[in-house]
């Protein structure tokens, strides 16, 4: 027998930490997760929490068409039209914020997750019209264009191979607070306490909520929408929070500390006395991209982490610079310059301590990738962008349950890694540095096997279609009657 045939089978699930008993129990694990969060779905007068189980199961086991009606038919009963589920998601006053709080509580209860990275990001979703809560013509980042849609600001958390959504808010454009939208704000359950807030302002709300909940994190990472806002950076500094925030290539910084103040008004000066701050010293600001042309500028390779595409290496440089806030406050920050493997160069500002090594700054920055993975998973694997509902409450409920689905996946990855470790021989046998982790798609495949969805028979499908047609006809009849009444002489 050749040495090759003597090697253990690489397709043995047991070697990959997937014993039969663990997979058989995954449905119970999902049910247990729902039970721990059950109180979040109760109201003062009712306990509709069973519908949260239905919805959670639907988004994790269905691949497409995850709307209220389809989830009810595939999870509850083929004859269920989804009205009760829709009422639970769109109108019931249970708190989506409580779900996020409980996720953060459970993260805190796992010591191995302490000291992670908070990731702040926004995600846009196209809408057909402007009637959904927060909808309007605005920049939709993942589509790279201005179009009709909704935008979410989401707070993620990353530590050691797991990423979780820990809070989110729907961005409401400024025009949604004018008198013309007063009726929609009321009908779509937008809280009366909501006032207009920019995305960085919403981000601060989410970060402060996480800090107030006692969530332990090392650093906050976000893209240039937040990094270019000097007030946002200064507020994080005031909260004694470390950040690594991307900035645009035309961001102005000072290479030496400038002197800032209100110029002295000399006797005999014509006009009003000086009242606005100015740079009083000779230093001139420069765009961050200009540093690439300096003769002493060099990038050095920094090994960051192993990925499925190999070892991730950034070529980086860092130096201390000074910036000035809108209020005229001079702040010293790190400027991290880093080059991706494809040659693209980016710039990042950080308030990390002066003694922070270059490798640490680069490691923190590269973990912002998991902000994108968080939204990618809730979109592609939990149907975040499949919501068909107009109300703010529906959006918050849907997003909270998607976050709970992501937390369930994170728990499975954490617990199975400890309870069912993989065969270390696989690394050598496959000749790679690290084994790939379980994905959300992998865990959903296992769930679909143990929680099969209900299938429609031809008879049930015919009855369902007829019921749908009758309901549409009744709606048409009601509208016709309303039109006749409105035209009737008084």
Image (cartoon, grey):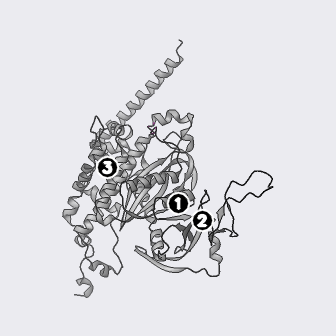
Which residue is tagged 1? 233
Q: Looking at this view, is 377 or 108 the one in front?
A: 108
Q: Which residues are magenta?
A: 188-194
Query: Can residue 444 be seen here?
Result: no
Q: Residue furthest bottom?
A: 2
Query: Which numbered dot is residue 219?
Result: none
Q: Earlier in the sequence, mark 3 or mark 2?
A: 3
Which residue is tagged 3? 56
Badges 1 and 3: C-beta atoms under 8 Å apart? no
Q: Nearer the viewer, mark 3 or mark 2?
A: 2
- Could you say where residue 478 lies in the image, as x and y percent from the top left? 44, 24
Residue at image coords 27%, 57%? 447
Q: Looking at this view, is 135 or 319 the one in front?
A: 319
Q: For numbered disc 3, what is the local secondary structure?
A: helix
Q: Main secondary structure of the magenta part?
A: loop
Query: Which quarter of the rendering shows the N terminus?
Result: bottom left
Q: CA distance from mark 1 to mark 3?
A: 37 Å
- Could you say where residue 347 lies in the image, as x and y percent from the top left? 56, 69
- Could you say where residue 219 lies in the image, as x and y percent from the top left? 43, 65
Density class for disc 1 (Cα within 10 Å; few <14, some 14-19, many ≥20) is many
Residue at image coords 27%, 75%? 10
Badges 1 and 2: C-beta atoms under 8 Å apart? yes
Q: For numbered disc 1, what is the local secondary structure?
A: helix
Q: For numbered disc 2, what is the local secondary structure?
A: strand
Which residue is tagged 2? 323
- Could you say where residue 297 lies in the image, as x and y percent from the top left? 60, 79
């Amino acid at each position: 027998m050749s040495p090759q045939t003597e090697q253990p089978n690489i397709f043995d699930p047991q070697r990959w930490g997937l014993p039969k008993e663990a997979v058989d129990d995954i449905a119970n694990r999902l049910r247990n997760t729902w039970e721990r969060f059950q109180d979040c779905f109760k109201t003062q007068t009712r306990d509709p929490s069973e519908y949260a189980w239905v919805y959670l199961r639907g988004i994790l086991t269905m691949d497409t068409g995850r709307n209220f009606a389809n989830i009810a038919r595939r999870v509850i009963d083929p004859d269920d039209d989804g009205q009760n589920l829709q009422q639970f998601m769109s109108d019931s006053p249970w708190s989506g914020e409580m779900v996020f709080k409980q996720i953060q509580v459970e993260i805190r209860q796992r010591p191995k997750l302490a000291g992670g990275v908070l990731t702040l990001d926004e995600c846009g979703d196209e809408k057909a019209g402007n009637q959904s809560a927060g909808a309007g013509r605005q920049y939709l980042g993942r589509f790279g264009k201005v179009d009709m849609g909704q935008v979410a600001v989401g707070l993620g958390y990353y530590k050691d191979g797991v990423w979780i959504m820990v809070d989110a808010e729907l961005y409401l454009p400024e025009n949604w607070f004018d008198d013309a939208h007063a009726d929609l704000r009321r009908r779509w359950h937008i809280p009366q306490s909501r006032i207009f807030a920019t995305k960085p302002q919403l981000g601060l709300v989410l970060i402060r909520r996480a800090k107030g909940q006692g969530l332990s994190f090392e650093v906050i990472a976000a893209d240039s929408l937040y990094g270019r806002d000097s007030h946002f950076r200064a507020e994080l500094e005031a909260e004694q929070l470390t950040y690594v925030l991307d900035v645009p290539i035309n961001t102005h910084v000072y290479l030496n500390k400038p002197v800032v103040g209100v110029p002295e008004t000399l006797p005999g000066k014509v006009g009003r006395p000086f009242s606005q701050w100015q740079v009083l010293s000779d230093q001139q600001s420069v765009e961050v991209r200009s540093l690439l042309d300096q003769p002493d500028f060099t990038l050095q390779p920094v090994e960051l982490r192993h990925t499925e595409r190999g070892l991730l290496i950034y070529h980086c440089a860092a130096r201390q610079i000074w910036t000035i806030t809108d209020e005229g406050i001079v702040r010293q920050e790190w400027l991290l310059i880093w080059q991706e493997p494809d040659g693209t160069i980016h710039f990042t500002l950080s308030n990390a301590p002066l003694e922070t090594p270059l490798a640490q700054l680069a490691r923190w920055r590269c973990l912002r990738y998991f902000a994108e993975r968080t939204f990618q998973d809730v979109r592609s694997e939990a149907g975040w962008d499949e919501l068909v509902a107009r109300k703010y409450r529906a959006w918050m409920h849907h997003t909270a349950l998607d976050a709970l689905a992501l937390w369930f996946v994170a728990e499975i990855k954490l617990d199975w890694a400890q309870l069912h470790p993989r065969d270390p021989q696989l690394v050598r046998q496959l000749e790679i540095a690290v084994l790939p982790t379980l994905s959300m798609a992998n865990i959903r495949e296992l769930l679909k096997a143990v929680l099969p969805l209900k299938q429609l028979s031809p008879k049930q499908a015919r009855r369902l279609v007829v019921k749908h047609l009758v309901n549409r006809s009744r709606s048409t009849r009601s509208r016709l009657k309303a039109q006749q009444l409105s035209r009737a002489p008084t």
